[in-house]
Amino acid sequence: MPYRHTQPGIVILAVCLVIGVISAAIASQTELTPMIVALTILIAVAIIFYSLTVEIGDGELRWHFGPGLWTYRIPLEDIRSVGIVRNHWWNGFGIRMAPGFRLYNVSGLDAVELHLKSGEVRRIGTDDPQGLAAAIEQSAFTKPRRCP
C-alpha cells in the first residue's frame, strides 16, 4: 500500500474526558440517569473518533475513524486537484459539513483538500498534510507506463 497513516484524536479524546469528568461530578450530586446517558454517549464518541486512518491503495483513497465501523472511499480517478489547507477552529472536529466543503478530522487544524471532478470538496484532517498530499498526487496523477 503506497500510503497509510493514523492520527490520534487527541482533541476529541480530551474534550470527551473533560466533559466526562464534569458530568461524573454533577452525577454524584444529582439524579444519575441523565448523567449515565451522557457518559454513555461520550464513551461512544471517544471510541468512534479516537483516531483517523487514511490509506491509499487499490486505486482509491480511503479513510475511517477509530475502529473502522464505516469507511469513506474516493476513487483516485475522481480527484481533480489536491491542496494543503488550514481549517478554522470553528469548523470543529469529527464529520462536518461546512460552507463549500465536507470535513473529516479528529485533531489539529491541518488538512488536505480534495477537489473532485463532481465539483464536491472534501477536507481530510491530518498531522501529515505534506505526506498525504504528495501520496495522493503521486497515486492519482501519474499513470503507469506500459512496457514496449
Image (cartoon, rainbow, N blue to C red):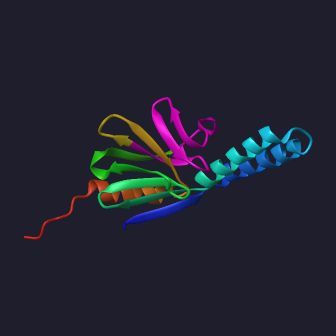
- Residue in front for this viewpoint, 56 or 28: 28
- Please give the name of the residue rendered at 46% of the width and 60% of the height, measured from the top-left corner: 131
Rendered-image quadrant of the C terminus: bottom left
On whether residue 80 falls in the magenta region, the answer is no
Q: Is residue 100 left or right of residue 140?
A: right
Q: In this view, does 118 lie to the left or right of 72?
A: left
- Please give the name of the residue rendered at 83% of the width and 44% of the height, measured from the top-left corner: 22
Work out whether 126 lies above or below 116.
below
- Please give the name of the residue rendered at 40% of the width and 44% of the height, measured from the top-left corner: 114
Q: Estimate the x, y position of residue 28 in percent, counting from the top left.
A: 90, 45
Question: How many labels sit on residues?
Answer: 0
**Residue 142 occupies quadrant:** bottom left
Rendered-image quadrant of the N terminus: bottom left
- Residue in front for this viewpoint, 127 or 69: 69
Spot the residue most to the right. 29
Is residue 90 at least partly visible in the picture? yes
Q: In this view, does 2 lie to the left or right of 48?
A: left
The residue range painted magenta reads: 86-114
Is residue 49 at least partly visible in the picture? no
Q: Estimate the x, y position of residue 35 in percent, counting from the top left.
A: 79, 41
Q: Estimate the x, y position of residue 54 in percent, counting from the top left.
A: 46, 57
Spot the residue most to the top. 99
On whether residue 103 falls in the magenta region, the answer is yes
Q: Estimate the x, y position of residue 40 in percent, counting from the top left.
A: 71, 47
- Please give the name of the residue rendered at 78% of the width and 38% of the height, measured from the top-left corner: 34
- Residue in front for this viewpoint, 74 or 30: 30
**Residue 137 occupies quadrant:** bottom left
Spot the residue most to the bottom. 147
